[in-house]
Amino acid sequence: MIAERAGQTFSLLILDEVFGSLDEARRFNVVELLRGLQDRFEQVILITHIEPVREGVDRVIAVRYDADTGSSIVSEAEGGEPVIREQKEFFDEREPRRRDRVEEESVETSAGAGA
């Protein structure tokens, strides 16, 4: 690993969308390889949209954005039972949601265009 060759040690490995171009057999091989890294890293975080990868990992946290409420829906399997929570605390209630800001900017731009 690059960190080891540089004389550094890391406890966290984050992999973002590494499975997108891999077929099922290669995805399985990568998951098995990552399981072998458990002795080198305290945490390995995979970010993926590939559902079958869920079967090869110890813990799954799913995050989905709900455009209607402006919050993220977080679900996690605990003992086989999914736990679902809304994560509105990520957003400051005083701060307008992005959708609202875009609408305000459009109105201001439209109003200013005729002046």
Image (spheres, rainbow, N blue to C red):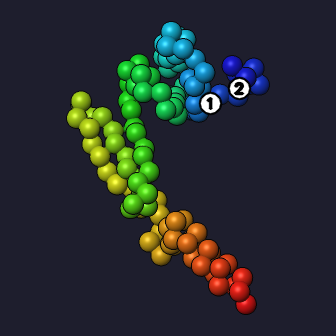
Figure quadrant of residue 106: bottom right
- Residue drawn where x is 56% and y is 23% of the image: 19
Quarter of the image for the N terminus: give it.
top right
Of pointers 1 and 2, the one earlier in the residue sequence: 2
Please name the amino acid that badge 1 sits on: Phe
Residue sitting at x 44%, y 72%? 93
As drawn, the label of residue 10 is 1
Q: Is residue 11 above or below residue 95?
A: above
Q: How many marks?
A: 2
Q: Residues within 10 Å of mark 2 (few under 14, many from 20)?
A: few
Name the mark on residue 48. none
- Lateral position of residue 56 relative to residue 19, left or right: left
Task: Specify the farthest residue to the right.
Answer: 6
Task: Identify the element where label 2 is drawn.
Answer: helix
Question: Rounded to the nearest whole Å, what is the CA distance between mark 1 and mark 2?
Answer: 7 Å
At 27% from the left edge and 42% from the top edge, which residue is drawn?
A: 83
Q: Nearer the viewer, residue 78 or 29?
A: 29
Point 77% across, 25% down: residue: 6
On the image, the x and y values in percent for residue 95 come to 51, 72
Residue 114 on image: x %, y %: 71, 86
Q: Are marks 1 and 2 in contact (CB under 8 Å)?
A: yes
Q: Quadrant of the C terminus?
A: bottom right
Query: Residue 14 placed where, x, y %?
Result: 58, 32
**Residue 3 - label:** 2
